[in-house]
Amino acid sequence: MEPRKVLTENMGGEVDFFFSEYVFNFIRRDIEREIALARAGNNASNFLAALGLLCYTDMLGGFISGSWEHGRSRGNFDVFFDALGDEYVAFRKAIEPQNPYSVYRCGMVHEYAVKEPCRIAMLKVKATCGVWKDAEGRYQFCVEKYFEDFMVAAWALYDRLMATPSVAMPKR
């Protein structure tokens, strides 16, 4: 994935810095490094990469809702998860009453395990979405595909925020 030049001159200072340093630098490089390790046939941190992406989904949703305040995690997660694309929206609706926030994100964050049987793969083979249920009803998570969709959505969010005259960091 080619990095884009982040414009920092006279644009939403703190938000621009956050995206430049955290999203397009630390987060992108960390996940890309793990994917590169897997492509080279080395052990890669599939679970930690998936966990990170799910937490980052929650975090970037705060830029859409405007808040990182206590009690906003589910809403923040859902709004950015849906921004990953139509297949993510369809997946979320297809597994109701369960939801990706609870099954994947909360399971990994609070129990260090997905709440349902799940396979976490680093590399995509034919994945058209980073999350799905297989024919046996087992949950799946593909780090590489989720990351690709995550970065597209992150850049779209960044562009939208930078076009907003009064862009600000989410409330804490």
Image: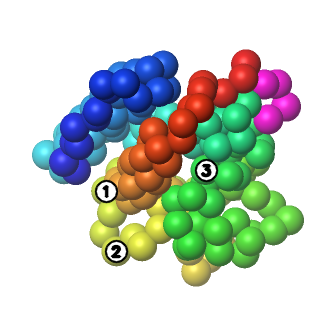
Residue 162 in magenta stretch = no
Residue 153 image position (x, y, % from top left): 46, 53
Which circle marks residue 123 in the picture?
1
Q: Disc 3, disc 1: CB below 8 Å?
A: no
Kindly indicate the quadrant of the structure image that contains residue 98: bottom right
Residue 43 image position (x, y, % from top left): 27, 38
Mark 3 against mark 1, which lies toward the viewer? 3
Label 2: which secondary element: loop
Of the pair 171 and 73, the residue shown nearer to us = 171
> Which badge, 2 or 3, is on the more N-terminal residue?
3
Mark 3 sits on what residue?
Answer: 80
Kindly indicate the quadrant of the structure image that contains residue 88: bottom right
Residue at figure coordinates x 62%, y 60% from the top left: 82
Q: Is the magenta stretch mostly helix, strand or loop?
A: loop
Looking at the picture, which amino acid does disc 1 mark? Answer: Leu
Q: Residue furthest left?
A: 40
Residue 156 in the image: above or below residue 168: below
Residue 15 in the image: above or below residue 31: above
Label 3: which secondary element: helix
Range of magenta residues: 68-72
